[in-house]
Amino acid sequence: NAIVEDTQLIFPLQVGPLANTQDGILDVNPLAAISKNLSSSNIRPLEWGQLNFLHTTDTHGWLPGHLMEPSYSADWGDYISFIRHMRQRADEKGVDILIIDTGDKHDGNGLSDATLPPGYLSQDIFKMADIDLLTLGNHELYRAEIAKQEFDVIAQHYAEKYLVANVDIILDNGTIVPMGRKYRHFQTKNLQLNIMSFGFLYDFFQNAPNTIVTSVVDTVQQDWFQDLLRSREFDIDIFVLVTHIPVRDFPELEVIVNEIRKYYLDTPIQIFGAHTHVRDFTIFDDKAYAIESGRFLETVGWVSVKGLNKTEKDTSIEPLGENQVNSTYNVTRKYIDFNRDSLMFHSNTTSDQFVIPAGAKVSELIHEARELLNLTELYGCIPDSYYTTRAKYPSSQSIFTLIVDKILPLLKSPIEAISARFDNPRMIIVNTGSVRFDLFKGPFTKDTGFLISPFKNDWSFIPDMPVSLAVKLLPILNQDTRTLAELGLHFDQNKQKCHDYYNTIGYSHLGVPTDLHDCELYYNQFMHHDNDEGNDNDGGIDLEMIFEWSKIIPRKFLYTLVSTYRMLSKKSQLSVGYVTIDDFGTEGDDTMHTPLPYYHLPNAVQSIQNFSFEEISRFLEGQKLNYKKVESEIETKAEDEEEPTIDVIFYSFITPFLLSALEELEVREQYADKIQFYGGKSLIGLLQEFVEGGWKFDYCE
Ligand SMILES: O=c1ccn([C@@H]2O[C@H](COP(=O)(O)O)[C@@H](O)[C@H]2O)c(=O)[nH]1
């Protein structure tokens, strides 16, 4: 695509004199100002402390904001304006504020993914934000050129603010250097609080060959970390951990907190987490807390801290003011919906004051970049919405049903010898995690494809696999983690067992990120799970009551209670959105909403073609059962019957998982060598082909 490649020649974008300005205020995103269904009367205010934080994470390139969803319609330029106002408010109050980002800036939006290399424009736009502490995510490490870009552009720009203790990069000359600084010690602007900050990535194993990820367990035993804690060389009022690690269910954060606690028994630790795309807040001990602030720039997390005592050694500062002294340590959190109404409300600005010139410039850059990349080019119109976790799979509203039934059958290999097999029996397996977002009714533009499935993954295949073997693959990939709960293995009592389970199989890394919380049976899933097909927006649930119940009732029973309660409750007038219950309770969301439905998804789905249902049903029967039972079921087939075969096609991303499945079936050696390149369009290309073939309209209703 010439336009995409051309971007390399003309960036950095030059913004001309600001157009459409009124008193220096520019609105380039017409939807950003829309406040349909939004009302500041439903917004809960932020509580300020001595030290305050704004947190973004897992933005995945959504710097233009959500053009179809008013609740999240602010853009990165608005965030830049917001940061400026909040810093000013902090100064006025004589307190401090730190701006944090915890990684995953790629894969999810045309702005980041339509360039070569991906991130070519978006990284330069991202870095216009004045961020105090940041780290990288796994999406900065999947591809070698992106890891290099992260190192060259982001790590160099933010310098001492860019922290990651457990990732190294191998430079072109073979030298191994750390991706970022391992720690940062500094004093805050107004209260001169002593901050010790570390950056960490979870134990990620799918990183590109030019990078090295060291496990968290090993990193905290390294000399530099141990010496730093042991030496007490620095005054430390609070540890601030900027991590791309989930705040629940994953073991890494506990490892870090435990190690710090060996030396600092009660120094506050504030953690910023990431990766599983949820709003969540967890308590590690009475002075160690962690927040995770959602995904896709839908959420800005807020944390405030009071009751910090200056370390004794430091006598250089004034005593803390009346409002800032609090002998008991106190932390608050909020999840801010990313729209201008919320941002103006919290920054106490009017629409005339909100947009600052630097923010307007960034909004303009985003707009120009989108134009340049043709992201608004219309390919067709989607007649109905199709959902990821908001609809049951399979169902008519599930995007995965659409993919299995209509999209995957379009896959063709560009290699002649392989495409000749197009009419042979074939099974196409794709991981649900490769689909990132819902497909909303309305225009399908070039951008939409990137929102749904940004990955340029290749297809691989194993030709002519016996059907009895092939049908066992999906059940293994989808091993049902929820059986843990059914066995009564509640996370709190069986944490290690749960983590061992994940660590051994690793299959959950195929599914949608929010489902990674299966260990905990994440609260929201009780809230959002419906028994029917569609979007049941019942509201009016007494969240406080459910929170109290959750302390005494096993969660599997709680689920039934909540479902019943929801059915009995009245329809709510609130707009749909996030309704979060975390370790602090039910008041976390800045805007009150009626909850969205939430359905668990399998890790992977498959589409089967050119095979009659009668013929395959006997072989497929085992799929409904636990994978361990499949073998015996399959063995019931007649001994002397000739075994039909099928081509097994899969996203190359899932190859390691497929190899593990083959190993579990004790046929890895036999089939690993048979894996071949299949080629063909990835999901984004197939989706576009389908839309242009079936839903090509010149206009959308
Ligand atoms: O090439 C790729 C890379 C990733 N995936 C899927 O994404 C998740 C990870 O996404 P997070 O936002 O970091 O949670 C991974 O588990 C895969 O499901 C992919 O399909 N292809």
Image: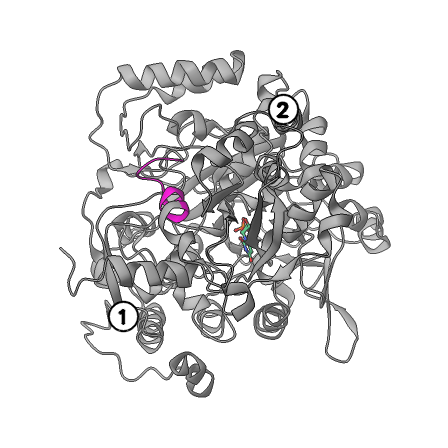
User: Can the viewer see residue 296?
Assistant: yes
User: Can the viewer see residue 84?
Assistant: no
Which one is in front, 538 or 99? Answer: 538
Residue matched to label 2: 636
Quadrant of the image occupied by residue 181: bottom right
Q: Please state the horizontal and vertical placement of residue 110, each as a whole percent of the image.
A: 39, 65
Circle 2 sits in a helix, a strand or a loop, which is it? loop
Quadrant of the image occupied by residue 445: bottom left
Task: Give the position of the C terminus as an image quadrant.
Answer: bottom left
- Residue at far front of view: 640
Task: Give the position of the N terminus as an image quadrant.
Answer: bottom left
Q: Is residue 377 above or below residue 236?
A: below
Circle 1 sits in a helix, a strand or a loop, which is it? loop
The boundaries of the magenta stretch are 394-404
Q: Please state which amino acid type lies under the numbered disc 2.
A: Thr
Determine which of the numbered discs, if any, sits on residue 569 in the image. none
Which one is in front, 117 or 617? Answer: 617
Q: Please state the horizontal and vertical placement of residue 327, each as a whole percent of the image.
A: 58, 32
Q: Is residue 624 above or below residue 184?
A: above
Category of crowding for the residue at label 2, using alpha-carbon neighbours closer than 10 angstroms: few (below 14), some (14–19), many (at least 20): few
Task: Look at the image and say whether residue 402 sits in the magenta stretch.
Answer: yes
Which one is in front, 46 or 295? Answer: 295
Quadrant of the image occupied by residue 214: bottom right
Query: Of the residues under marks 2 and 1, which one precedes in the sequence?
Result: 1
Residue matched to label 1: 377
Q: Is residue 70 above or below residue 2?
A: above
Q: Is residue 633 above or below residue 503?
A: above
